[in-house]
């Protein structure tokens, strides 16, 4: 945690917050905070700044906060991701938030088990918790927009063309396509398949919307590895 992420409900006065639970524990045991210390803080969806420790006991942490800076800029990237396994999803959500991706569309695909959509990790509170961990890691406050799309064809045919309009459209497809471009100038819509990749029909539909099939070389990478690798290459 490189930033204590605050919420509006934490404020007990205009410039005072009171924290408990995981955040208090982190400040006490990991940061070794003491009265008078300044910690890095940020308001969810808002500015970042500093928090001066007023009091720290076994249950609560009181801070006097000054929020006077903008968080890191977001990447101009929309990620369309075939829904991964639940345990992988948690790591992916943290990574997406830490990288500063603007929007994440979790999409059904042929090789996505239908049971994945019943996972409690897709509940809004569970998603928000994982995004918060990613934001804290990166020192950011603005989470990506996360949307669920349980039907492949309607999304690709009815929504994706508009979402990709005016953007560089790419689909990660190790068996074919050209090398993934580097340092793209402008916004990107990137589609990444499930373990095993998109099936040929899905690639056909995605490329029909204007997405270009690309690869990172001969190695097949896990979803949680390929996302930061692609983002690092593109931006």
Image (cartoon, grey):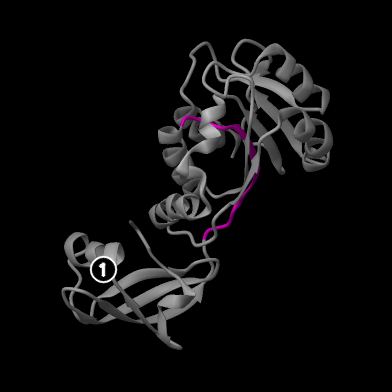
Q: How crowded is mark 1: few (under 14 residues within 10 Å), some or many (20 or more)?
A: many
Magenta span includes 73: yes
Q: Where is residue 108 in the image (x, y as percent from the top left)?
A: 63, 30
Residue 45 or 167: which is nearer the viewer? 45
For the N terminus, the image quarter is bottom left
Residue at position x 66%, y 11% in the image? 176
Residue 203: image location, x then y, percent: 72, 18
Image quadrant where residue 158 sits: top right
Q: Is mark 1 on a helix, strand or loop?
A: helix
Q: Nearer the viewer, residue 123 or 194?
A: 123
Give percent across and percent down for residue 26: 25, 62
Task: Read off the residue under disc 1.
Answer: 24
Query: Is residue 188 depicted above or below 216 in this figure?
Result: below
Q: Which residue is drawn at 18% across and 75% down?
A: 34
Q: Which of 202 and 168 is in front in this view?
A: 202
Q: Residue at x 60, y 33 (%)?
A: 81
Q: Which of 155 and 135 is in front in this view?
A: 155
- Classify the position of the C terminus by image quarter: top right
Q: Position of residue 229 (x, y in %)?
A: 50, 31
Quadrant of res 185: top right
Question: Up-down: is 100 above or below 30?
Answer: above
Magenta range is 72-85
């Amino acid at each position: 945690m490189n930033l204590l992420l605050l919420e509006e409900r934490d404020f007990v006065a205009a410039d005072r917050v009171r924290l408990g639970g995981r955040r208090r524990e982190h400040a006490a045991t990991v940061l070794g905070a003491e009265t008078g210390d300044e910690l890095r803080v940020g308001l969810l969806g808002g500015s970042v700044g500093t928090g001066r420790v007023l009091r720290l006991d076994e249950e609560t942490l009181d801070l006097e906060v000054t929020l006077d800076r903008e968080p890191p800029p977001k990447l101009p990237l929309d990620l369309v991701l075939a829904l991964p396994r639940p345990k992988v999803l948690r790591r992916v959500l943290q990574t997406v938030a830490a990288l500063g991706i603007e929007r994440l569309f979790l999409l059904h695909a042929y090789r996505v088990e239908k049971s994945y959509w019943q996972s409690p990790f897709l509940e809004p509170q569970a998603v928000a918790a994982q995004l918060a961990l990613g934001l804290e890691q990166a020192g950011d406050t603005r989470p990506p927009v996360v949307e669920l799309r349980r039907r492949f064809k309607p999304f690709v045919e009815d929504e994706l063309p508009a979402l990709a309009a005016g953007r560089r459209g790419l689909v990660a497809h190790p068996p074919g396509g050209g090398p993934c471009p580097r340092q793209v100038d402008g916004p990107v819509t990137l589609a990444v398949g499930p373990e095993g990749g998109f099936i040929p029909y899905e690639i056909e539909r995605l490329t029909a919307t204007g997405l270009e099939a690309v690869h990172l070389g001969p190695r097949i990478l896990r979803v949680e590895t390929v996302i930061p690798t692609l983002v690092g290459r593109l931006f």
